[in-house]
Image: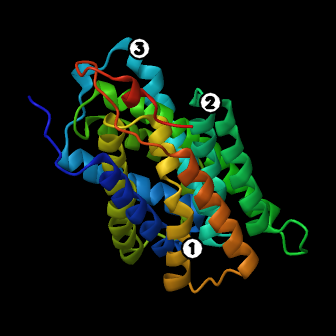
Amino acid sequence: MRELKVPVPPWGLAITAILSVQLGSALSVNLIDTVGPAGTAWLRLSMGAVILLIIGRPPLRSIRRRDVLPLLGLGVTTGVMTVGFLAAVEHVPLGTAVAIEFLGPLTVAALRSRNRAALAWPALALAGVVLLTQPWQGDFNLVGVSWAALAACGWGVYILLTQRIGDRFSGIGALTLTVPIAALAAAAVGIPQAAGHLTVDVLVAAAGLAVLLPVLPFALEMLALRRMTSAAFGTLMALEPAVGVVLGLLILHQHPSPVQVAGIVLVVLAGAAAQRGGRRLRKEEQASPADLDFVG
């Protein structure tokens, strides 16, 4: 079966995924209050897995032995990343959690760049995170920052594994394999948190949030990463902290201070500076030297 051609440019897919992720995160706060961050992650991933299995068929016959570890790795990473981020949102503002998490893909982009000067951009973003979290203040939330740092590590690994798996399976086939694994990974801590709080309203809310995250953005990211370098995709995510701050302000009424706004600006500038392009060439396409100079 021929792969469906997507007329939307890869950066458009990535931006839509960003909006879906941050909207889903902002709207998850009420559910977190009810079933906890791990319970929310487990419910969203479980509902997402059900939706994906309804609309798609797992390509079990296409799995080769060398695919097993990457599939398991991506599933577990997705579960850990989701739990970590939602746990961070419970303790720190949405924009701050996103900015810290963004250090993961930005570091991936810098390390994979052929230009060592690109390592300056994660350093600049880290300076922005310091302004955001203000560790010199008495209200510095080490727990929230630590959860966000775990999510950052997960996001970096997620980008690398998603591109590898996306090259092997077409459509949403990979998601029908990895999201159920992510749900199982989150279940270990999610079920104990959610136990005793599961109602029809909670399940309906989780199903709606699952469309915003993981179903829609994960599918869009999979499509985007087939047509972009992981470095370009990672640095394009520089818009995530800004979107997180805006939605945190509009939906959660979280008001950043001028110093924290300056921190967000530094993070976004770091990502924008690291981004130079990003269309990823398939094997059958002929690459020119200009095509290969994506980052830094």
Q: For marks 2 and 1, give the CA distance.
A: 31 Å
Query: What colour-coding does the image apply?
Result: rainbow
Q: Residue at x 31, y 52 (%)?
A: 13
Q: Amino acid at mark 3?
A: Arg
Q: Is 136 on the left-hand or right-hand side of 162? A: right
Q: Secondary structure at mark 3?
A: helix
Which label sits on residue 225?
none
Q: Residue at x 26, y 49 (%)?
A: 9
Q: Amino acid at mark 2?
A: Asn
Q: In this figure, which residue is indicated by the disc labeled 3?
A: 66
Q: Residue at x 50, y 84 (%)?
A: 250
Asked if labels 1 and 2 touch by Cβ distance under 8 angstroms, the answer is: no
User: Can residue 46 be seen here?
Assistant: yes
Between residues 57 and 66, which one lies in front from this camera angle? 66
Q: Amino acid at mark 1?
A: Val
275 up-or-down from 91: above or below: above
Q: In this figure, which residue is indicated by the disc labeled 1?
A: 245
Q: In this figure, which residue is indicated by the disc labeled 2?
A: 115
